[in-house]
């Protein structure tokens, strides 16, 4: 028997504090492919789609993949973009399908609806009727709503942060879908939630309490009627009512017993809310550490991560406070990236390679969040297309595009200036543009946690800084209106 499966990928992590709406152009900049193109580009890489295709082939499914769409984390998704992207999927729902497979993020907010994934699932479910199974994969930085769990029978999130198990996540969800299609099981997904903006370590799985939680989750999955346990650290930069960490159990059988397990894991997230593992230095402290830093090439660089200006969580990536602190302290043999400043890049196109320029760099979006424009004297080291091919554990073999890109040398710091924002998560994002992070004494980058997958192995030491940009951990500076109160850590009492 060959099942007919309709699939699509529609992914966005929406930072509702980001003033720029996420438009169709932002999806085109990042990922907007029809089904055939998506399979060609992503179908054999470390992606959920690859996992789906692999397992689908094993079960002889006929898979119709409609599209893959993702934009860089940013402001609310416009209704126009949402409808344009989703329509090729909804149009096909009137055909006969045995199941639907959706690759989602789980933290999409649109300008007309706070629960983007809930809205996608509502439309799909309305067309399919109550019985046809829907399987969903999520990023563990999902804010999973009650509606999502009511609308999709199967929900499975990645188990790693840095996320390196995308393909495996697709495989796991597809295996559960196959058993459902065979009517061997009739799963649904239970949800336990706690009133927090996010799991206190942002869901880190490389150290800390998440390691034990995931070990327990894998143990629960050994039980015959538990198919997947997902632990979502949530996404804090969203002013929505259903925010916060969730534990999901996709299961059948003894529901109260399974719910009890989910609540137990959620309790652990709540009880360990004070066990903060990152130490967030100020930019001045970081510059001080960097000025005393001496490393040999064999040891590797000091890696400084600007947690708050992480474009991977919807910050603008144009903050300058950290760069200014490093320049003020004359840090030597360093690199820094990226500064997202399409305006500066466009201006720099007027100069030849090697030119000396004086330019206003970064800080143009919201100077109060992470620093305003820096007027700098610089030397153009590199300029050209920002297209690159990843080499590391997260985006190995996958294309990324920074748009028009320039490398500036400012004092003794090589600064990557890009037009399209991505967080720094792969060495190729420096190396493609002539910067060798391994040969630097200090490497400063914008990322919260994903950078660790590629940069920890080359680093002598890693420190994290909060530059006060949009993803600051000082949540009190953000204007939360819709999150239910009290909530941790806004209301500590
Ligand atoms: Zn994530």
Image (tube, rainbow, N blue to C red):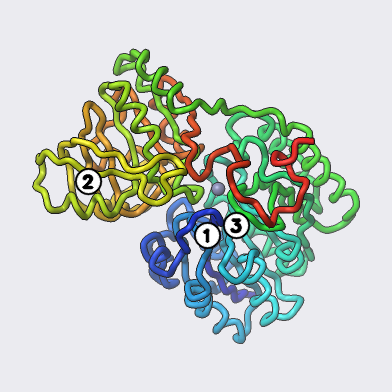
Name which residue lies at 70% across and 41% down: 490
**The C terminus: image quadrant:** top right
Labelled pair 1, 3 in contact (Cβ < 8 Å) = yes
Q: Earlier in the sequence, mark 2 or mark 3?
A: 3
Q: Which residue is mark 3?
A: 107
Q: Secondary structure at mark 2?
A: strand
3D distance between C-alphas at marks 1 and 2: 27 Å
The quarter holding residue 359 reads top left
The answer to whether residue 64 is visible is no
Number of marks in picture: 3
Is the CB–ligand 1 distance for label 1 below 8 Å?
Answer: no
Position of residue 109 in the picture relative to residue 353 (left or right) = right
Name which residue lies at 11% across and 49% down: 351
Q: Which mark is residue 12?
A: 1
Expressed as whole percent of the image width and height from the top left, the position of residue 394 reads 45, 44
Q: Nearer the viewer, residue 240 or 129?
A: 240
The answer to whether residue 299 is visible is yes
Q: Earlier in the sequence, mark 1 or mark 3?
A: 1
For residue 150, above or below residue 279: below
Q: Secondary structure at mark 3?
A: loop
Q: Earlier in the sequence, mark 1 or mark 2?
A: 1
Mark 1 or 2: the one toward you = 2
Labelled pair 1, 2 in contact (Cβ < 8 Å) = no
Q: Nearer the viewer, residue 485 or 390?
A: 485
Q: Secondary structure at mark 1?
A: loop
Residue most extreme to the bottom: 94
Expressed as whole percent of the image width and height from the top left, the position of residue 158 reads 60, 48
The quarter holding residue 184 reads bottom right
Expressed as whole percent of the image width and height from the top left, the position of residue 403 reads 28, 55
Q: Which residue is mark 2?
A: 406
Mark 3 neighbour class, 10 Å CA radius: few under 14, some 14 to 19, many 20 or more: many
3D distance between C-alphas at marks 1 and 3: 6 Å
């Amino acid at each position: 028997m060959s099942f007919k499966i309709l699939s699509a990928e529609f992914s966005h992590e929406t930072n509702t504090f980001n003033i720029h709406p996420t438009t169709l152009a932002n999806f085109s900049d990042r990922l907007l492919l029809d089904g055939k193109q998506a399979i060609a580009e992503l179908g054999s890489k470390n992606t959920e789609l690859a996992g789906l295709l692999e397992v689908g082939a094993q079960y002889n499914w006929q898979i119709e993949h409609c599209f893959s769409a993702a934009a860089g984390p940013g402001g609310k998704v416009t209704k126009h973009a949402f409808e344009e992207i989703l329509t090729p999927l909804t149009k096909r729902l009137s055909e006969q399908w045995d199941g639907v497979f959706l690759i989602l993020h789980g933290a999409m907010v649109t300008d007309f609806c706070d629960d983007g994934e809930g809205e996608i699932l509502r439309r799909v479910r309305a067309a399919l009727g109550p019985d046809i199974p829907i399987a969903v994969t999520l990023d563990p930085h999902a804010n999973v709503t009650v509606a999502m769990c009511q609308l999709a029978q199967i929900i499975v999130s990645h188990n790693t942060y840095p996320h390196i198990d995308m393909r495996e996540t697709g495989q796991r969800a597809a295996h559960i879908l196959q058993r459902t299609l065979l009517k061997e099981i009739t799963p649904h997904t239970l949800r336990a939630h706690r009133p927090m903006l996010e799991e206190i370590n942002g869901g880190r799985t490389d150290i800390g309490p998440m390691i034990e939680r995931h070990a327990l989750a894998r143990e629960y999955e050994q039980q015959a009627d538990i198919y997947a346990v997902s632990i979502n650290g949530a996404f804090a930069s969203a002013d929505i009512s259903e925010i916060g960490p969730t534990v999901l159990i996709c299961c059948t059988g003894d529901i109260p017993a399974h719910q009890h397990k989910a609540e137990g894991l959620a309790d652990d997230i709540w009880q360990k809310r004070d066990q903060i593992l990152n130490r967030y230095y100020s930019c001045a402290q970081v510059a001080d550490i960097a000025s005393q830093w001496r490393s040999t090439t064999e040891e590797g660089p000091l890696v400084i991560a600007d947690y708050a200006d992480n474009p991977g969580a919807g910050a603008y990536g144009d903050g300058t406070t950290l760069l200014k602190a490093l320049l003020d302290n004359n840090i030597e043999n360093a690199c820094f990236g990226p500064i997202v400043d399409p305006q500066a890049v466009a201006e720099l196109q007027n100069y030849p390679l090697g030119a000396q320029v004086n330019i206003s760099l970064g800080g143009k979006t919201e100077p109060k969040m992470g620093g305003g424009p820096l007027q700098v004297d610089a030397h153009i080291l590199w300029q050209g297309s920002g297209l690159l091919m990843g080499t590391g554990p997260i985006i190995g073999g996958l294309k990324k595009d920074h748009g028009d890109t320039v490398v500036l040398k400012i004092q003794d710091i090589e600064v990557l200036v890009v037009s399209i924002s991505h967080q720094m998560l792969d060495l190729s994002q420096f190396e493609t543009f002539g910067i060798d992070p391994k040969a630097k004494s200090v490497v400063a980058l914008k990322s919260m946690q994903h950078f660790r997958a590629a940069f920890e192995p080359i680093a002598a030491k890693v420190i994290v800084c909060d530059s006060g940009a949009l993803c600051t951990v000082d949540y009190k500076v953000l204007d939360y209106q819709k999150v239910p109160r009290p909530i941790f850590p806004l209301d500590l009492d």
